[in-house]
Amino acid sequence: MATSKFQALWNHPAGPKTIHFWAPTFKWGISIANFADFSKPPEKVSYPQQVAVTATGLIWSRYSTVITPKNWNLLSVNVVMAGTGIYQLARKIRHDHFNEEQAVVAKE
């Protein structure tokens, strides 16, 4: 049973014998790095970088749902990539725009 599942994965058109497996697998490194950046202070987060991460995640998530064969590894890495990018952008926006308003109110 396990052997047949392994063979099915191995011989899949998006399996480990193809670039369609390895490209998204290595792309997980970007998502992991973005997770690691959650501990970084928000003022060190880059708008252009996080917009690119978010846009890439959203665009490729959509693309991965319409291609044949279905590539679930590509879909999952890009959903996570878009999610981490959105979270980082929210942290940056909250820090840049909402903390300033609170500081002004506190000074008055």
Image (cartoon, rainbow, N blue to C red):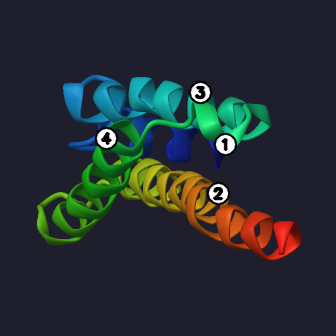
Task: Give the spatial CA distance, label 1 vs label 4.
Answer: 14 Å
Report which quarter residue 71 is drawn in.
Answer: bottom left
In the visual, does 46 lie left or right of 68? right
First in sequence, mark 2 or 1: give its number: 1
The residue to which callout 1 is attached is 42
Residue 77 x %, y %: 45, 48
Task: Give the spatial CA distance, label 4 vs label 3.
Answer: 16 Å
Dot 2 alpha-carbon crowd within 10 angstroms: few under 14, some 14 to 19, many 20 or more: some
Between marks 3 and 1 in the image, the one whose residue lies nearer the viewer: 1
First in sequence, mark 4 or 2: give its number: 4
For residue 91, which numbered disc appears in the image? 2
Q: Residue at x 45, y 61 (%)?
A: 79
Residue 67 x %, y %: 12, 62
Examine the rendered structure and indicate whether residue 51 appears above or below residue 68.
Answer: above
Task: Give the spatial CA distance, label 2 vs label 1.
Answer: 6 Å
Report which quarter residue 106 is drawn in.
Answer: bottom right
Q: Residue at x 78, y 71 (%)?
A: 102
